[in-house]
């Protein structure tokens, strides 16, 4: 995928959905669309771009399904929660009054498992800290 191909795909996705695919997403787009190319659905990135450009509304779901994460679950991305737990329990944990300053943000949660996972992880960490485990 050339930079021009990525820019066209990025522009089309933004135009159709408002999703901003910045340059850091180029490899993700290449991998996701490349998988569809290997499965025989697309012959090249240029053909892919042309197809989605022509059939905009009908093709937007197919394009977005190709480049987005389409599942949710509790503790999805376990390494993130392991890291989170390590930061909160390692070294010099914050004073109790500082825990009130924690803020969390979870974007794109279709049914809410991710923010519930963050709340569970935080409560478990606080409970373990209180009990000394």
Image (cartoon, rainbow, N blue to C red):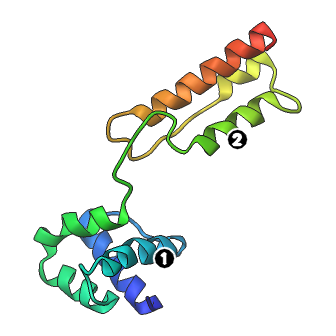
- Considering every residue shown, the one lying at the far front of the view is 39
Taking 105 as reference, is 16 above or below it? below
Q: Looking at the picture, tell me which residue is in the foreground, 30 or 105.
A: 30
Q: Looking at the picture, tell me which residue is in the foreground, 60 or 40.
A: 40
Tell me the tag on residue 83: 2
Residue 123 percent location from the top left of the image? 61, 18
In what quadrant of the picture does the N terminus appear?
bottom left
Taking 49 as reference, is 25 above or below it? above
Residue 34 percent location from the top left of the image? 39, 78
| Quarter assignment of residue 132 | top right
Q: Looking at the picture, tell me which residue is in the foreground, 99 or 74.
A: 74
**Residue drawn at (26%, 83%) of the image:** 42
In what element is the residue under mark 1? helix
N-term-proximal mark, 2 vs 1: 1
Q: Residues within 10 Å of mark 1 (few under 14, many from 20)?
A: some
* Left or right side of 113 for 121: right
Q: Looking at the picture, tell me which residue is in the foreground, 82 or 25.
A: 82
- Considering every residue shown, the one lying at the far top of the view is 131
Residue 31 percent location from the top left of the image? 45, 74
In what element is the residue under mark 2? helix
| Quarter assignment of residue 55 | bottom left
How many numbered circles are shown? 2
Taking 17 as reference, is 86 above or below it? above
**Residue drawn at (75%, 30%) of the image:** 88
Query: Mark 1 = which residue?
Result: 26
In what quadrant of the picture does the C terminus appear?
top right
């Amino acid at each position: 995928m050339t930079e021009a191909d990525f820019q066209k795909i990025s522009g089309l996705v933004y135009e159709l959905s408002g999703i901003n695919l910045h340059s850091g997403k180029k490899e993700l787009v290449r991998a996701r669309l490349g998988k569809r190319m290997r499965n025989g659905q697309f012959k090249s990135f240029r053909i892919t771009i042309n197809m989605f450009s022509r059939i905009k509304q009908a093709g937007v779901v197919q394009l977005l399904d190709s480049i987005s994460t389409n599942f949710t679950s509790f503790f999805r991305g376990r390494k993130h929660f392991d890291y989170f737990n390590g930061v909160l329990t390692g070294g010099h944990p914050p004073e109790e009054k500082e825990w009130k300053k924690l803020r969390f943000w979870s974007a794109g949660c279709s049914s809410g498992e991710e923010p519930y996972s963050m709340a569970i992880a935080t409560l478990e960490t606080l409970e373990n800290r209180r009990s000394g485990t």
